[in-house]
Amino acid sequence: MTTIFTVSVDAVEGRTLRGRVHIVNPDVPHVPKESVFPLSLLADAWWMLDHGYLRDEDDEDGERSPYTAEQGKDITAGMRLKDEFPDLFELILGKEIRVTEDGYLLADDGRTVLEPRRKAEEVYKLSGGSRPGYSVFTYGDAEEFDQRAAAIVTSYDISPYRNVPLLSEVAAVRDPDEPWDPAKPDGPADLDDYDVWDLFGDHTLAELPYAEIVVTVSDAGYLEHMAAGMRWDTTMTGDVC
């Protein structure tokens, strides 16, 4: 799936997380303002750790984790609120249903066909998402996820965007032969303008636009799996599938 944002964690202190959301996809140039977004990031990080997917990559701008894959799994297994995170993840992306290649429901072992034999589409309302020959997905639940976010995320602040080029810099790229009129007011360019992104062709992650976020939750248990130094690519926007 296409990366929407890259997320960096700078500090976790009690019930508060401080981090950065790096804008790496010009098709989604703004950090979502709704509280469902930071909650979806916490669920995303939980899922990656729980499956051993969040660990250091060789690429300088790649994903980072202070934990090994096994340590990450141990942390999620020992979380006080560990039973809440599978539910949160399913509210976003829907429930994953194990099936045979022709769509019949399987037991938790992923091999035994459940009796009586029924196809998933006969039992569940499916979203159309799937891992062919392995599983299908139900729809998420936007209303329930909104309610959970309202209860869990007690505050969520976003800074002004950093590393945003000036209007004059964008104009110089758009038309090098047309000098910028110094009488015009200059200031940060609009990240919705695709010409802005021509300035970032060879830039590192640290040089791309980003916003700092500060997230406070109702219980520190929701941050037990988070740590300074974590960085991962996410497809999360707060929207429910």
Image (spheres, rainbow, N blue to C red):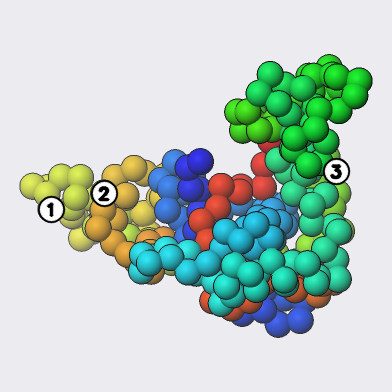
Local packing at callout 1 (Cα closer than 10 Å; few below 14, some 14-19, many 20+) is few
Give how far across and how far down residue 186 sits, in percent: 31, 60
Q: Which quarter of the picture shows residue 181? A: bottom left
Task: Give the residue at mark 2.
Answer: 198
Residue closer to the observer: 6 or 60: 60
Task: Give the left or right position of residue 112, taking residue 207 as reference.
Answer: right
Task: Give the left or right position of residue 33, taking residue 84 as reference.
Answer: left
Residue closer to the observer: 114 or 35: 114
Q: Is residue 215 visible?
A: no
Kind of residue at badge 3: Glu
User: In terms of sequence position, does the residue under pointer 2 or pointer 1 come before the other?
Assistant: 1
User: What is the spatial separation of the Cα atoms under label 1 and label 3, in whole angstroms?
Assistant: 53 Å
User: 16 above or below 189?
Assistant: below
Task: Give the residue at mark 1.
Answer: 179
Query: Can you say which quadrant of the picture contains the C terminus?
Result: top right
Q: Does the residue at mark 2 contact the one at mark 1 (Cβ under 8 Å)?
A: no
Task: Give the residue at mark 3.
Answer: 144
